[in-house]
Amino acid sequence: MKNNSIVIESNNLSKSLAASNEGGDKSNSSQTLQILHLINLKINQGESVAITGSSGSGKTTLLGLLAGLDVPTSGEVTLLDKKLSTLDEDQRAALRLGKVGFVFQSFHLMDNLTALENVMLPLELDSSLSLNNSAIRDRAKEALSQVGLEPRINHLPTQLSGGEQQRVALARAFVSNPTILFADEPTGNLDSNTGNEIVDLLFEMQQQNNTTLILVTHDDELAKKCETHYRIENGRIDNSEQEASLIENKKEVYVS
Ligand SMILES: Nc1ncnc2c1ncn2[C@@H]1O[C@H](COP(=O)(O)OP(=O)(O)O)[C@@H](O)[C@H]1O
Ligand SMILES: [Mg+2]
């Protein structure tokens, strides 16, 4: 259920990088590579949003900017009512803690920790929770049982299949009951059957927790499972696609 409060907003968000001048230009002029150009979007609490586009179109860069992992060249991101430009790196990390979860293509588990320890980690890091170790352990176990991994909680990531590792990553992402979950190609390293299982779990947990989901994918079929669809090409959002998808879903249109 949505309460129509905006949890992420971007205004004229742009990112460019200085490109090295391989041509030996004597003028020493620096070239810039425009990665994202004037991205405007508004995402509501509980909404599921797909961001698609071909490889290199800027999807991962956009996700990093929206999550405050990266800083824009110009424009603004408002995340959970905070203008990210007013926060330094530590303050952005503090804002994410307990409220923003991530799932990546390559799982990003800590190799030296068991499945259970990986899922306990975000709760241990969040001192505001003031949970003792056994309460943390219980919550992590519960999250792992939700993803069907109870029998393997003491396994290291290297002892788990790709699909199992992504289940651990899902449990870790949801254990704090985050407001927002960013998922970057979460099925990219999995075969299609395993990928479908992960997708089903992801949407099940998203709906159960009323989590806002920002799902980056190059898979249009997967994108259709989301309420809203933004397509990026060459660093720009193709609004016609988004409007078509919104009309299809009979949703409010938020195109600035
Ligand atoms: N740190 C970086 N340095 C140089 N180029 C980068 C960097 N990060 C991204 N790019 C370039 O920006 C473009 C968008 O990258 P990315 O956001 O990773 O695309 P996608 O996730 O859609 O595949 C690509 O052309 C990529 O090569
Ligand atoms: Mg990417």
Image (spheres, rainbow, N blue to C red):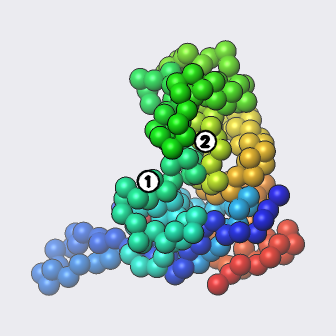
What's the distance in space between the residues labelled 1 and 2, CA to CA? 15 Å
The residue at the point 74 percent across, 47 percent down is: 209
- Residue 128 lies, in percent from the top left, at 51, 44
From the image, tell me which residue sits under label 1.
93
| Residue pictured at 43% horizontal, 53% vertical | 93
Q: 147 or 22: which is nearer to us? A: 147
Q: In terms of image quarters, where does ligand 1 lie? A: bottom left
Q: Position of residue 122 (x, y in %)?
A: 51, 38
Residue 95, placed above or below residue 245: above
In this rendering, the answer to whether 118 lies above or below 48 is: above
Front position in the image: 55 or 141: 141
Task: Estimate how packed mark 1 is, as few (under 14), some (14 to 19) or many (20 or more) residues with alpha carbons within 10 Å.
Answer: some
**Quadrant in the picture for the C terminus:** bottom right
Can residue 2 be seen?
yes
Q: Within 8 Å of ligand 2, the CB of disc 2? A: no
Q: Quadrant of residue 153?
A: top right
The percent position of residue 174, horizontal first and vertical second, equals 64, 41
Q: Secondary structure at mark 2?
A: loop
Q: In the image, is residue 68 above or below residue 247?
A: above
Amino acid beneath label 1: Ala
Q: Secondary structure at mark 1?
A: helix
Using a 10 Å C-alpha cutoff, classify the residue at mark 2 as few (fewer than 14 neighbours), some (14 to 19) or many (20 or more).
Answer: many
Snapshot quadrant of residue 104: top right
What residue is shown at x 57% (from left), y 28% (from top)?
136
Pick the residue in front: 109 or 77: 77
- Position of 246 compared to 238: left or right? right
Identify the residue at horizontal 51%, vertical 53% (top origin): 96
201 left or right, relative to 27: right
Image disc number at residue 176: 2
